[in-house]
Image: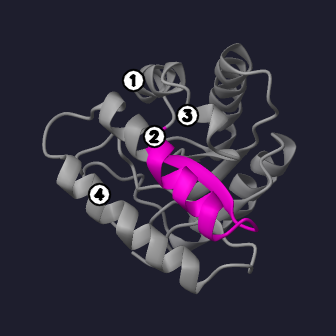
Amino acid sequence: TKEGQDAFVRYVSEVTSRYKNKGIIWEIWNEPNGKYWESKPNFKEYSSLVKRVSKTIREHDPSGIVVAPALAGLNEESSKWLEEVFKEGILDDIDAVSVHPYRNSNPETVAYDYRNLRSLITKSTKKEVPILSGEWGYSTARGPNSLNLDEQKQAEYFVRMFLINVLSDVPISIWYDWKN
């Protein structure tokens, strides 16, 4: 809602004023293409929020780096949503695209998805926009939707995940999570 966005902008104003001049990476929202919004993921509402929040961040913390959208998944479905967000012009307002490229397969399979995302970015802007891996990991939790990894395999995937990100020119990789 407009009231919700106004409240979030006020929050961002306070936080960025308090922590300014520290070169912080400010990520706008978490997985907005997921189930966090009351209705189905709305690219127009999210794009509006990014434009307002990025302006607030830049006003209060010129040293800050603005990234978005912390995309849930990196696949055909999430890429369609992201393409609509890019059409709304958010690439003009951010410094990097953040993604959460979880998968139920080995880490190397992300290379294809990174290439597709770079192509989408290049198609959408002339500006150089890096890709960040803002959240990704392989859990040892057991269940029907997991890979049922033991700690040894998790450790192997951890190293391979970071290596494939380096090979794919992804400058930041955040591992999630360490346990379970």
Residue 79 seen in the figure? yes
The picture places residue 56, in percent across and down from the top left corner, at 53, 59
Q: Nearer the viewer, mark 1 or mark 4?
A: 4
Q: Which residues are magenta?
A: 50-73
Q: Nearer the viewer, mark 3 or mark 4?
A: 4
Q: Tell whether 117 sits left or right of 82.
A: right
Q: Residue at x 73, y 65 (%)?
A: 62
Mark number for residue 77? 1
Q: Closer to the N terminus: mark 3 or mark 4?
A: 4
Residue lying furthest top:
123
Q: Closer to the N terminus: mark 1 or mark 3?
A: 1
Name the kind of residue labelled 4 in the image. Answer: Asp
Q: Closer to the N terminus: mark 1 or mark 4?
A: 4
Name the kind of residue labelled 2 in the image. Answer: Gly
C-alpha gap between disc 2 and disc 4 = 28 Å
Does dot 4 land on a helix, a strand or a loop? helix
Q: Residue at x 18, y 46 (%)?
A: 1
Residue 136 seen in the figure? no
The picture places residue 144, in percent across and down from the top left corner, at 25, 50
> Label 1: how many residues lie within 10 Å, few (<14), some (14-19) or many (20+)?
few
User: Which image quadrant for residue 58?
Assistant: bottom right
C-alpha gap between disc 1 and disc 3 = 19 Å
Q: Tags 1 and 2 in contact by the CB under 8 Å rule?
A: yes
Mark number for residue 6? 4
The picture places residue 26, in percent across and down from the top left corner, at 59, 64
**149 w.r.t. 71: above or below:** below
Q: Tags 1 and 4 in contact by the CB under 8 Å rule?
A: no
Magenta-span inclusion, residue 70: yes
Name the kind of residue labelled 1 in the image. Answer: Glu
Q: Which residue is mark 3?
A: 90
